[in-house]
Image: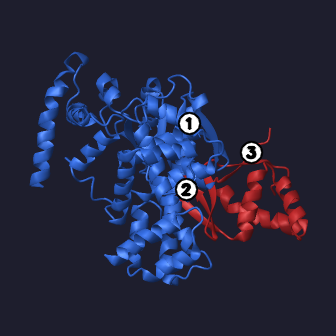
Chain colours: A blue, B red
Amino acid sequence: MKSVNHINELLLEATRLQPNVSKLNKLISKVEDYKALQNYSFLHGVLPLVYKSLKHPDVKIDKDVLLAFKQKFISISQKNMQMTAELITLTKLFKEHKIKMLPFKGPTLSQLLYNDINSRQYGDLDILVNEESLCEAQELMSQHNYKMELPKKFLKNRLFLKVGKDIHMHNSTSANLVELHWKLFETKFVFNKKDFSNQSQTVLVNNTPIETLKNENLLLYLCLHGSKHFWERLEWIVDIDRLINVAKNLDLKEIEEQAIKMKSKRLFYLGLSVSHAMFYTPLPLDIKKAIEEDKIVQEMTKKIAANFSKNNIGKKSTEPFNLDEIKNVSAFTQKNKDTLKSRFIYYFSLKTGDILMVNLPSYLSWFYHILRPFRLVGKYLKHIFS
Amino acid sequence: MYKNKTYTISPSVMLQHIDDESLLMDANTKLFYELNDMGSVLWETLQHHTNFDGVVKEMLQNYDVSQEQLQNDLMLFSKEPIEKEMIIINEEC
């Protein structure tokens, strides 16, 4: 157990913007299980960063351990190169067919944060399109070796489009997964319908200009995405820290206003708070003060840091009825009093899983609300008996 | 051999410097090629130009080597990528 704690401390130090070499050496000397170190680095999505810190000439680490890290890093880099090439091909394909798209996370985020495509781990590609272009984009990808997991009829189901946010497209040649989004979240985080131009920025990936989310939208997305997953992986926190450090003239006030509109100010604050607590991310004084005064954000930040120390990675998502998660959802809302309302919303709001049970015509969409409790009970029983 | 000819590097090809290695990847074939230092410099120079004469001129400015030697090295280096369509020789108008 002791060695696991040192591993966490080591991961944290190794992923800092400027790791302290003497602190790294102290922590390395306490690690008993180097396989676990590599495994946790990978699970937290930070293996490339950890490897880069460990290979510093003044870091004292066993050569074989470093070699094992290097081999894994090269394997991640090769995968990243393949995915980046695929993204570039898709970008050109969409451009030829005049379909506007914004790739985000993956290679574009890595390029923005680290000026290369290999310092982040990514397992899929994420592309945002307008809802109006979704069918056209899906059709185009289908013509180029991509297979959709769902039957196509769901793309005509209005409720599915309202409740869902993305479809999975598998490339049958490369085996890569592309998540084709028409929204970034199930909530109201929807971009300008016709024109992405004022919401985007250009990033050069392998000498190819690619449009991606502008930094303000990206930071808000990262804060909401990390909160959705309870900041289980260190990479999500590192991304926030790096973006704030790297992005010039980042307008945090603009993001705060957008977050307030989306009733997600607390989620935004939580992202900043966790990053500040773990990486000392610089924040403007007024925002820092507001975060410090929000007791729920402070409490959640402590829980997330404790969760990281306990190495709970991968243990949460198997619970279909996780009470902690529900408490978190209610705590994240901007009004503190509506816990019951939040629980009600959590249980009775339709999810994509409900729609995917059966494709109903619009006039029968009320029936999904009747089906949902049965689906939840079935899911619960399945969990118990498995 | 390739004098006065223009070329295009296939968009499926990507060079990355990973750690102390230079890896060239062809996304079409999913094959990776490890380049040595000189190979890496040559490929990067190829990326900045569209004809071989330009590559030779730039390399001559930076390296102490004869033009003939450089042309031979360039031909030898680019033979395989051309065969594998990683470098595409443009048809003359």
Q: Chain of mark 2?
A: A
Q: In the displayed structure, would residue A229 be above or below residue A188?
A: below
SS label for mark 1: helix
In this picture, residue A119 sits left or right of residue A183: right
Q: In the displayed structure, would residue A347 be above or below residue A275?
A: above
SS label for mark 3: loop
Q: In the displayed structure, would residue A309 be above or below residue A283?
A: below
Q: Which mark is residue A59?
A: none
The residue singled out by tag 2 in the image is A81
- Residue A186 lies in what quarter of the image? top left
| Quarter of the image where the N terminus of chain A is located | bottom left
Q: Which mark is residue B90?
A: 3
> Is label 2 on the same chain as label 1?
yes
The residue singled out by tag 1 in the image is A253
The 10 Å Cα crowd at callout 3, few under 14, some 14 to 19, many 20 or more, is few
- Three-letter code, disc 3: Asn
| Quarter of the image where the C terminus of chain A is located | bottom left
Q: CA distance from mark 1 to mark 3?
A: 52 Å
Q: Chain of mark 1?
A: A
